Amino acid sequence: MTTATLITINPISRLEGHGKVTVHLDDHGEVDEAFFHITQFRGYEYFCHGRPFEEMPIITQRICGICPVSHHLASVKACDAICGVQIPETAGMLRELLHMGQYIQSHALHFFHLASPDLLLGWDSDPAKRNVIGVIEAAPELARRGIRLRKFGQDIIAALGGKKVHPVFAVPGGVTHALSESARNQLLAGFEEAFQTAHTALAIIQGWIDQNMADVQVFANFPSHYAALVDAQGRLQLYDGFLRVKGHAGDILAQFESRQYLDFIGEHVEPWSYMKFPFFKDQGYPEGCYRVGPLARLNAADAMGTPQADAALKLYRKIAKTNLKGASLMYHYARMIELLYALEKAQALLSDKRICAKEVRTTAAPAHAEGVGIIEAPRGILIHHYGVDDFGTINKVNLIVATGHNNIAMNRAVTRVAKEYIRNGEIREGILNRIEGAIRCYDPCLSCATHALGQMQMILQVIDAAGQCIHQTAR
């Protein structure tokens, strides 16, 4: 979905997965419509049929190598619901710690590797340098600190699950093993530098927003609903909580338990994309557009619930107010506040003596025919819904991932950016990069959303009013 120059320099397109963008121009060379097409086939929901339900936390995390922990935990929560068990307190703490490790590594990866080339080097900078290598050359110490911060999150995952990617840790009823005192102490030693890097990143994005306010105000800025998990007091929750849908004006449209999600969320299908389009049922499709992820969480929650993140949220809201509440570029700012939150939560969990307790699992047989697990993945709400027969064999699977929830919004974002920057058919490389950047704000994981089979091209096309392709770049 990138320009040939950008793709040639960076073999990854600064998002996970494959897709294409088509921009349709009218007779005057102005943008009529733009579409974000997902060209991958979805299959996970079907080939899991017939598997024992307890295998699902291992199987489904193979959907992705970037956010496997999120699938691992959403899946095991669905399995807990099938068993009807309340897991031990320490097991819950360890799962949440694993989740915070995922947030730290994922948010650090996106900011320092995927978003920073645009933010630090500029939308119109030389494509040969506008990539992670260019960032390393321009700001070597910052790049190194970003790499170490991501590694710190991965170290948390590895300390619990045995490896940085696709851990084996959460099981129905709890976790496989306790955390040792030595492992806890080793992890606690890494927070000083991690906090310093997080605050540096927060200062960078705050300064960038201030210096580029004119762009922020027009760059894919539109109203929508916002969905996120919150606790009973309305504070942000990433592992568990109520699912809240809040309107753009700040009114709470719905707040419900995870098992009720089908009463509020519908899914629409378009012929030009393999990814479904979830929508808020009360408004229907496409008016029921809602967003998930960092921007949505900060808009939906009343507070963060940790001191440093709450202080950062206060300044964020002072800057955002009403006119930037729906600005897609504010995702980058919100993501760094969440990074701070994840570090605070992880440090608090590791500082609690109960984190090393030995009671970490309750065993039980299947007690219910269905189970729903919802978690806040770094990119937004992740839903795993399973059905089983009397023997605990999977006979139904429904997965709605964060990128899917954002599908309507991402299409609106590329349309807004294309209309704002393309004039009289002028198609500069930097403009195409901005269209890509609208999608990167959401940090989409297309492999999660569509469960790819094989390698498919990533194509960006510009089509004139007669339906002729006048510009195409392909990976």
Image: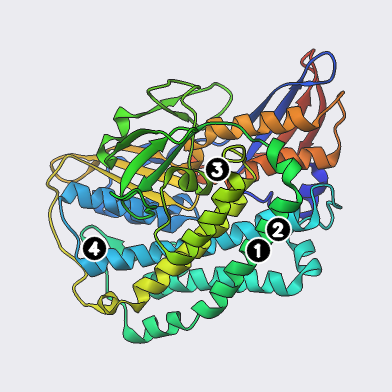
How far is the residue under mark 4 from the one under mark 2? Answer: 43 Å
Residue position marked by numbered label 3 in the rendering: 446
For the C terminus, which image quadrant? top right
How far is the residue under mark 4 from the one under mark 3? Answer: 29 Å
Q: Are marks 4 and 3 in contact (CB under 8 Å)?
A: no
When the figure is inspected, residue 267 is found, relative to residue 213, above or below; the finding is above
Taking the spot 40% from the left edge, 85% from the top edge, the residue there is 185
Residue 328, horizontal then vertical, whole percent: 62, 41
User: What number is the disc on residue 353?
Assistant: none
How far is the residue under mark 4 from the one under mark 1? Answer: 38 Å
Horizontal arrangement in the rendering, residue 80 relative to residue 334 (left or right): left
The kind of secondary structure element at disc 4 is: strand
Residue position marked by numbered label 2 in the rendering: 207
What kind of residue is marked 3? Answer: Leu
How far is the residue under mark 1 from the one under mark 3? Answer: 30 Å
Residue position marked by numbered label 4 in the rendering: 174
Taking the spot 23% from the left edge, 57% from the top edge, the residue there is 172
Residue 36, horizontal then vertical, whole percent: 63, 32
Q: Are marks 2 and 1 in contact (CB under 8 Å)?
A: yes
Image quarter of residue 17: top right
Q: Could you tell which of marks 4 and 2 lies nearer the N-terminus?
A: 4
Image quarter of residue 177: bottom left
What kind of residue is marked 4? Answer: Gly
